[in-house]
Amino acid sequence: MSRVSPCSNCGSTNQYRSRKPVSSGGGHAPVFLPGLGPWYSAEKFEIVVCGACGLTRFFARNEALEKLAGSEKWERI
């Protein structure tokens, strides 16, 4: 995960991370990390929220990052 503290919006070090990864979609919702999870489910995000200003950031897990360069569903820009 990228550096999360201090907050890039307000400078606070009061940061919170989700205890468990959260699904990046699927079912009736769009999939925000297509092709990076196992074939049977959507990949997951780690979420960080600033306790001072509420800025919320979603980070792909390392398992997803390892698949990114080789995925046909993503292109480098």
Image (cartoon, helix red, strand yellow):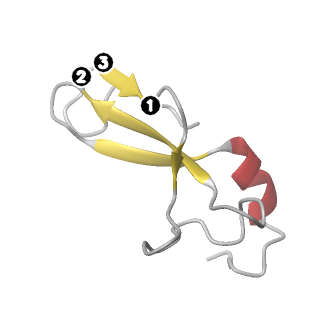
Is the N terminus in the top left, top right, bottom left or bottom right quadrant?
Answer: top right
Say which residue label 2 marks. 12
Q: Residues within 10 Å of mark 3 (few under 14, many from 20)?
A: some
| Left or right of 45, for residue 70 | right
Residue 73 appears at what percent x and percent y?
70, 80
Is the C terminus in the top left, top right, bottom left or bottom right quadrant?
Answer: bottom right
Q: Earlier in the sequence, mark 3 or mark 1?
A: 3
Residue 13's disc is: 3
Q: Which of 30/77 is in front?
A: 30
| Residue contact between numbered discs 2 and 3, judged by CB atoms under 8 Å | yes
Name the element at disc 1. Answer: loop
Residue 18's disc is: 1
Amino acid identity at mark 1: Ser
Give the vertical position of 77 relative to 39 (above or below): below
Residue 3's disc is: none
Give the vertical position of 45 relative to 49 (above or below): below
Which numbered disc, 3 or 1, marks the residue closer to the eye? 1
Q: Residue at x 27, y 30 (%)?
A: 50
Residue 13 appears at what percent x and percent y?
30, 18
